[in-house]
Image (cartoon, rainbow, N blue to C red):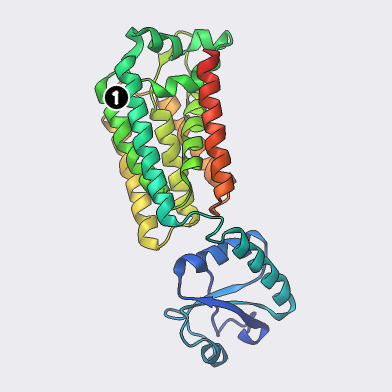
Amino acid sequence: MTSLNNEDPEQSPSEFVIIDSTNSEQEAREWEVLLSEAGIVHEIVDSLTTPMAETVKSEVKTARYVMLVPLSIYYQVSSLLQKYDKEVSPQTQPTAALYSTQSLALGVALSLLLTIVFWRAPGLTSDLGSRFAMQSSLVWHGEWFRCVTAVFFHSNVEHLLSNLTFLIALVYFLSAAIGPGQIMLAFVITGAFGNFVSLLLHNKNHISLGASGAVFGLLGLLIGIALRRANFTDARWRRRAIWGSALALVGLTAFSQHVDMAAHLGGFFFGLLLSLLWSPWPSLSRDIFAALLATGIVIGSFSIG
């Protein structure tokens, strides 16, 4: 978040006018993202930590965060803020609490799904496991659906429990930034991309299965969003997300046997890329579209197989 300093010779407070103020850190951060991505010159002042001109203090007595913009673009910024407020109004957007509840439900649902699949098809010894696992020779012969379907199968109980533990933790942290639909889509496509990278780097006899690439994809997405400081409610949450991600990275690599590092790294870096491409603004319509797309990819892949 930027701040206005009275001692800055290039930008005097007199060149700016107050356009809005708030006591909500979350709202102030949303302003910062909105105006920065729009390329609009602005200043957001935290009155508790930043010295302000007396004219600013006299106009804003109770709000902690003050947004200032050049007078010449005041009406342009005002129009942009009104449009943004309308798009993210409570009538059209879920609250952060609802997002967290939905994301937690998603984490539980994914865990149950992976558990049920493992119970019905434990590893490559089962008919379903061999039918949908990543077998490089078959993928090169056109069975590309295996890049997606292999994400939902595991070789043993330890493999499954390891992925479930970190999956639920990552979904919990991501729920502070994006909705469950986007998390679901990220899980599917980063897992598929991780398997694709594994395909490229291993020989044609390589066989693999498991959600580790998808879990690493969520890990990369979380780290990328946390470093962008997008939509996380406070600095402590971002620090917890980053430290939690680092511990997850160590846990997923240090305590796993027969690790497919190509799939892990492929999923991880694709997750980082998604964090740069996806908008940090919450959107119900975007989240519904992401959920439908993820569902379509999974159902389509299993139907082809």
Q: Position of residue 49 (x, y in %)?
A: 43, 78
Frontmost residue, 304 versus 36 = 304
Residue at the spot 43% in from the left edge and 31% down from the top edge = 214
Residue at the spot 49% in from the left edge and 31% down from the top edge = 188
Give residue 80's quadrant in the image.
Answer: bottom right
Work out whether residue 199 can be spotted: no
Along the horizontal axis of the image, is 186 left or right of 277?
left
Residue at the spot 46% in from the left edge and 79% down from the top edge = 64
Judge whether 163 appears above or below 61 on screen.
Answer: above
Frontmost residue, 87 versus 128 = 87
Work out whether residue 92 can be spotted: yes
Residue at the spot 40% in from the left edge and 11% down from the top edge = 128
Instruction: Write down the residue under mark 1.
Output: 159
Along the horizontal axis of the image, is 100 left or right of 144?
left
Judge whether 91 appears above or below 186 on screen.
Answer: below
Judge whether 228 appears above or below 160 on screen.
Answer: below
Q: Position of residue 247 (x, y in %)?
A: 30, 43
